Amino acid sequence: MTAMSYNVNGKTYQFDADPGMPLLWVIRDIIGLTGTKYGCGVEICKACTVWIDGSPEKSCDMNASEGVGRKITTIEGLSATPVGVRLQKAFIDCQAPQCGYCQSGMLMAAAKFVTSNSKPTDSQIDSALGNICACGTYPRVKQAIKSATGQPT
Amino acid sequence: MSKRTETKAGTVSRRAFLGGGATVVAMFALDAAPGSKMARAIAASLPADTAGGAVNGWILINADNSVSIAFGGAEMGQGILTGLAQAAAEELMVAWSQVRTQVAPTSQSYITGGSFGIRANFQKMRIAGAQARGVLLAAAAATWGVDASACTVSDGVITNAVTSATLTYAQVAKSAAALTPPAAPTLTDASKFRMVGRSMARLDLPSKVDGSAVFGIDVRVPGMLYAAVKNCPTIGGTLARTPATPSGVIAVVPLGNAVAVVASNTWAAFKAASSLSVAWTIPTAAAQLTTSTISSQAQTLMATGTAGSPAAERVGDAPGAYGAATTRIESTYQLPYLPHVCMEVLNCTASVTPTSCEVWVPTQAASWVQATAMAITGLPAAAVTVHPTLLGGGLGRKIEQDYVSQAISVSKAVGKPVKLTWRREEDLSHDQYRPMGLVRVRLGADSGGRLTSIATRTVAPSPLAQRGWMAPTGNDNVEGAEGLPYAAANRLVEYVKHPAAVPVGFWRSVGNSINCFAVESALDELAVALKQDPLAYRRSLLAGDPRTLAVLDRAAADIGWSTVPAKGVARGIALSNGFGSIVALAVEVSQPTVGVMKVNRVACAVDCGLAVNPGQVESQMQGGIIQGIGTAFWGQTTFSKGVASSRNFSNTRMLLMKETPSITVSILQSGLESLGGIGEVAVPPTAPALANAWFKLTGTRMRSLPFFPGANRMDD
């Protein structure tokens, strides 16, 4: 066990953890922010996507020690960003989520993507969002991203 | 519910639904059964949670004049939380912005499956809303000393038509709660609906875009420990002895066919469980549970097995008519075991004490969870409280009790609250799979091409038989084969039970997912043999069923069936009529590289009677089609000596956004009387529509699912 300090959504958290514990489980079990989801643990489904220093990363693929000294943003912090608010509103306007389980990861990926691509095409959205959604919300997620970027849906 | 559950459960399940801070002024406990005169006012909370209790409270009026509508089902993405609230709110005559929802007690819960959520509860919720409106109006009228007929209501505000005075629902709720509700209230005529039939915004979505939604896996109970399981890798195997507790682990709990590891966080439990060395006792019968063996047993049963008697459907003399037919098609279709693949892995949180048991769980069957807890703890129903959470997908898997009983047993063993979570690898390799199936279809047509006989023979393991609920006809196993809309004077639907001991369960659309593929593929083969267009041929068989014909025609029109497709593109069509609804799919596919299918476009038409929330009907169609494509392409679990092949997404490929075609959905509405289910119905016609289009494109008939078993890998 190692004493660590995290900055998550602008707040500081101090705790002891096994440095090998994936960041995902630090966020969920130790810090207690459960919006970030476990889906596979092997870096495929992307349900666990968070921002590390502003870049979307799969939190199941990072060790606890790698989160130290970084600026971590989770779904719970998304509404503090203008782009996040825009995306959240578009996801609701388009009624995108079904079960909702993968949507935290979808939103974290989408919000970062539209920051660097203000008018994405369909194929750019397809390439950017490799998140697995078993409910099949893809058409509406795509619609929401286009809506959030002021494009006709 | 006890005070304790208010504070503990409130932190996890209720707050997520209520958005916090709802103050209950009064609650109408309404017996929704017409004719009942029971009405009770219960302040401050939902009624005590007694199994099978008579209290039937659905509507709460809050201090801020919002209304909380109790929800007794499972919200797993299909939107019934919202759809049923629409039914009650319609009759209650409140604005949608006033509507909240609240988890109903277990006694009011219902099993969520079979696409019955709306069908079974829509009318009940309308009556509950109308009864509440009735007493609220009566209370206001009494306050003013006028007849209720002199009062009108809009958005939860009652107006005295004579004096123009107003009272809110909240202002009269307490006195209203003491009144007897009308036993058979007048319901709004369907032509006057202002909320039902519209795409009202889902009540659960705000919590699903900011991380606040509480799924089972998110439950946190003070003082809880974390458990992970290692299920015996081999079906039927049991623990030979309890392994020693590794260092860093709090406890190891034997569970018969599994072992649980309890630790201080999920990851520590996962790590310990996956590295735990366990001795299992493997039954010799497990050696038979190999896919090739199961398949050859199915072939033998197809040839010589005894079908259940009586047959599920027997009209005329199908074998005789087949023998006399001018054109005959006999084709056999093979389908694999399928995992459910809910995005939220199985999990359950339990807190067992000598006198109580609380369970927080993503479940499709809260009352079964209660029964499971009673069986394990020996406690009476009154001592068991179930807190159903949102489900990160259910698909039929979360009706089962395996993960529930594990969590309760572990909490009982360690004497502390425990959240038990299955690693994805456990979730996929210890599913209760959609059964494999072997289906033979024999179709006979006369010299004029008219279908004279249709005979299906389905060989498959039975989820019902494994539970001892089996009728000889085959029950769920013949869905999608019996009651077909096509005109044929001679029909025979047979089922032969396959005894394989692979655990099987209810997978989205159940038997329809198997038989629809066979029937709709075979019809296509017959149309080809008769040199007829597959759409035109189906149309000729549906002359007596205008409702089904309209759905088929709509899908065909939407894909542009009468036009010539682009070069390198071919179309296919298929029809399904399960769960009281009718769905037709027309698809366009192409072959970008040899042997690779690309789905370019899907046109879906559906008639579910009345679309309570058309936006959600569209979502369910899109989602079912997307699941249908992914599973048709790659979905399967194979077995080797009782060990399942599925591990993680690495070998369980899911359709991604970039592979998703354009999907249009047209909703036809034949009326409230024909209210049908919607959650499962888009899955069955997807695979045959694709196979039919692929044949048109390539001349190769796909009679075995999945189409591309070798392409099932995904990586990061």
Image (spheres, coloured by chain):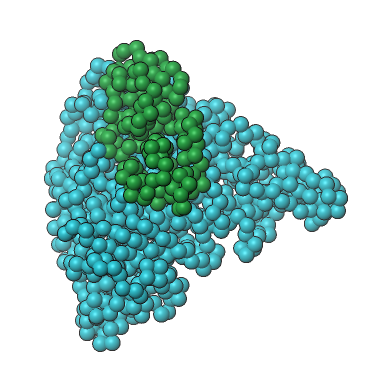
Q: Is residue A65 left or right of residue B67?
A: left
Q: Residue at x 31, y 45 (%)?
A: A127
Does residue B708 appear in the picture of this structure? yes
Does residue B321 appear in the picture of this structure? no
Q: Residue furthest bottom?
A: B447
In the displayed structure, would residue B566 be above or below residue B215? Answer: below
In the displayed structure, would residue B346 be above or below residue B442? Answer: above
Quadrant of residue B177 within the rendered picture: top right
Nearest the viewer among B101 and B630 is: B630
In the displayed structure, would residue A40 be above or below residue B109? Answer: above
User: Chain B drawn in what color?
Assistant: cyan
Quarter that holds the C terminus of chain B = top left
Q: Position of residue B450 (x, y in %)?
A: 30, 83
Q: Position of residue B271 (x, y in %)?
A: 25, 26
Nearest the viewer among B317 and B472 is: B317
Q: Residue at x 66, y 38 (%)?
A: B62
Quarter that holds the N terminus of chain B = top right
User: Chain A drawn in what color?
Assistant: green
Q: Residue at x 39, y 25 (%)?
A: A72
In the displayed structure, would residue B341 be above or below residue A77? Answer: below
Q: Residue at x 39, y 23 (%)?
A: A71
Q: Position of residue B228 (x, y in %)?
A: 30, 29
Q: Position of residue B588 (x, y in %)?
A: 30, 64
Nearest the viewer among B200 and B463 is: B200
Q: How many marks?
A: 0
